[in-house]
């Protein structure tokens, strides 16, 4: 059942209250474990000269305590991130309801570009636990073949212009009609304001999570891979080659776009966020 504006506000306030409590708890936890971290550093430095069994036992003890502390802090951080995602979901649900009621807000192009950038930067970060499998739609991991994108999700959509030219554009899912196996999507570009009805083979869901390069590098496209990437300051996807991978969670891919206007056929290096870099869609036959 759709949320009313009052219900949505109350749910957001409830989660913000929980989030504040978790942030305070994380800060308290960090202050509590700081002495043990300092002790660990001190004993590790001493261990380079002192190889005695007693020091080895002390190091083993502080490392064990440190591991337990880290797991506790990780649990609190994951809880906080979950609350943030809940708030995002509630706000997105309300936005979709407003759009369906005919109250879609018009966004200027500059603001749209900024919004897309922020959306990519704040996409939830997946950090796997030991032995945990990386989920679909995390980084370069494609969606499961049976996956259906939800209303409000961002996708790459292959659309045909009035001139008959086909282009991959950034679009937002309005709905999926199971009886026809087709999506209804809106062009994200406010200047176009076009709605398209497309088959599933013309849709590529965008990642729902960023991959953490420091823990889950296998969920990133390897250097040299040909991909589709959103050209900076546009809402269209074009072929590109991965030139450099992000090294930290906040970094972007460095890509070279195919561009015949340059002598070597590629643009200078440009940066594109993980959210807007996807595998090339292989279509044997494309229909609308």
Image (cartoon, rainbow, N blue to C red):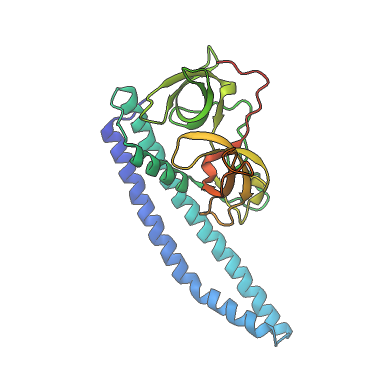
Question: Residue at horizontal 33%, vertical 30%?
Answer: 3
Q: Position of residue 238 (x, y in %)?
A: 56, 35
Q: Single out the residue that lies furthest toward the top.
A: 179
Up-down: is 96 above or below 58? Answer: above
Choose top left, top right, bottom left or bottom right for residue 185: top left
Choose top left, top right, bottom left or bottom right for residue 152: top left
Dividing the image into 4 quarters, which one contains the N terminus?
top left
Nearer the observer, 115 or 3: 115
Up-down: is 60 above or below 46? Answer: above
Up-down: is 64 above or below 85? Answer: below
Question: Residue at horizontal 31%, vertical 36%?
Answer: 108
Question: Residue at horizontal 53%, vertical 50%?
Answer: 252
Question: Residue at horizontal 50%, vertical 70%?
Answer: 33
Residue 209 visible in the shown view = no
Q: Position of residue 35 (x, y in %)?
A: 50, 76
Nearer the observer, 203 or 17: 203
Q: Is 80 positioned to the left or the right of 14 in the image?
A: right
Dividing the image into 4 quarters, which one contains the C terminus?
top right
Q: Is 245 positioned to the left or the right of 190 in the image?
A: right
Choose top left, top right, bottom left or bottom right for residue 204: top right
Q: Single out the residue that lies furthest toward the left.
A: 6
Q: Position of residue 197 (x, y in %)?
A: 48, 17
Residue 232 visible in the shown view = yes
């Amino acid at each position: 059942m759709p949320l009313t504006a009052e219900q949505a506000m109350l749910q957001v306030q409830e989660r913000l209250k929980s989030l504040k409590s978790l942030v305070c708890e994380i800060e308290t936890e960090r202050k509590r474990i700081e002495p043990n971290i300092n002790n660990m550093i001190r004993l590790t430095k001493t261990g380079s000269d002192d190889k005695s069994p007693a020091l080895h036992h002390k190091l083993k003890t502080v490392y064990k305590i440190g591991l337990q502390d880290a797991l506790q802090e990780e649990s609190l951080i994951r809880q906080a991130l979950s609350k943030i995602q809940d708030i995002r979901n509630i706000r997105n649900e309300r936005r979709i309801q407003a759009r369906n009621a005919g109250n879609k807000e018009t966004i200027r192009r500059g603001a749209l570009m900024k919004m897309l950038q922020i959306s990519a930067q704040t996409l939830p970060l997946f950090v796997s636990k030991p032995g945990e499998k990386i989920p679909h739609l995390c980084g370069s991991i494609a969606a499961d073949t049976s996956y259906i994108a939800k209303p409000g999700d961002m996708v790459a959509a292959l659309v045909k212009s009035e001139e008959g030219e086909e282009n991959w554009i950034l679009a937002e899912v309005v709905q999926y009609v199971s009886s026809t196996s087709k999506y209804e999507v809106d062009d994200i570009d406010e200047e176009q304001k076009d709605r398209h009805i497309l088959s599933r083979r013309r849709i590529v869901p965008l990642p729902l999570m960023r991959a953490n390069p420091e823990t889950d590098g296998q969920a990133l496209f390897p250097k040299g891979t040909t991909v589709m990437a959103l050209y900076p300051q546009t809402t269209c996807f074009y072929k590109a080659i991965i030139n450099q991978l992000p090294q930290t969670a906040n970094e972007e891919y460095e890509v070279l776009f195919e561009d015949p206007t340059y002598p070597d056929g590629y643009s200078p290096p440009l940066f594109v966020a993980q959210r807007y870099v996807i595998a090339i869609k292989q279509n044997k036959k494309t229909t609308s």
